[in-house]
Image (spheres, rainbow, N blue to C red):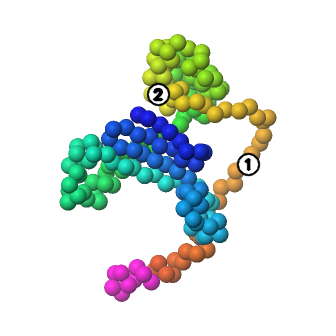
Amino acid sequence: MKKGRAGDESVWWSNTRHMLKAYIKHIEMLKHGCTEDDPAYQWCKEQGVVRVEIELKRRLLNDLDMVDIKNITDEKLVKVFHEQTEIFNAVDRTDEPDILDAIPPRSRIHAAAWMAGQDLRQLLPNGTFYRHAKVLRDYGIDITEPRNVESFPVKVRIVEMKPLQMPDWYSLEDQHESHLKAVGE
């Protein structure tokens, strides 16, 4: 599968069946003419919204019997979206303290080196590199991707958890009235 990125805000993966794109929504909104004072822009930025899109290519459309537009349904599209985005549900376990203990001993040192920011392509012969890449993928580690690690002095950071506040421009009363009209009060 081919991978690419556009700046720090978007990435894509593509093969002969589909193209999967993910990008930071508020940055993309600015590129398309939105202003920074727009409530939707501000909300997307505050929430950290990432938009995911999938382009289905003819090969996958044919396999799914969706080449003819009359065969395309919302149910089929939702199912394909969930199947193709399942990879985003995989958890990056590289920050777990015991992850190295779970890795087979022969690959453990390579995982540790990658986690420390080493470029293993420069350190290992090609065959060895790909053999360990295959093993480590089962543990949520992809040594084929560069690890962006920089050493910083140790700093304590306190993260305050609090309930999400609804945007000022959103009204529950308007939603309640719309719902009552929809159900025929």
Residue at position x 59%, y 45% from top? Answer: 7
The residue stretch that appears in magenta: 177-185
Residue at position x 41%, y 40% from top? Answer: 14
Q: Which residue is mark 2?
A: 137
Q: Earlier in the sequence, mark 1 or mark 2?
A: 2
Q: Which residue is mark 1?
A: 158
Image quarter of the N terminus: top left
Q: Where 64 falls versus 40 (above or below)?
A: above
- x and y, in percent, of residue 131 in the image: 46, 17
Label 2 element class? helix
Label placed on residue 39? none
Q: Which quadrant would residue 43 be assigned to in this image? A: bottom right
> What amino acid type should be assigned to the residue bearing mark 1?
Ile
User: In this orientation, does residue 66 appear?
Assistant: yes
- Judge depth for marks 1 and 2 and give the one in front: 2
Magenta-colored segment: predominant secondary structure: helix
Residue at position x 71%, y 33% from top? Answer: 150
Using residue 48 as the reference point, say whether residue 137 is left or right of it: left
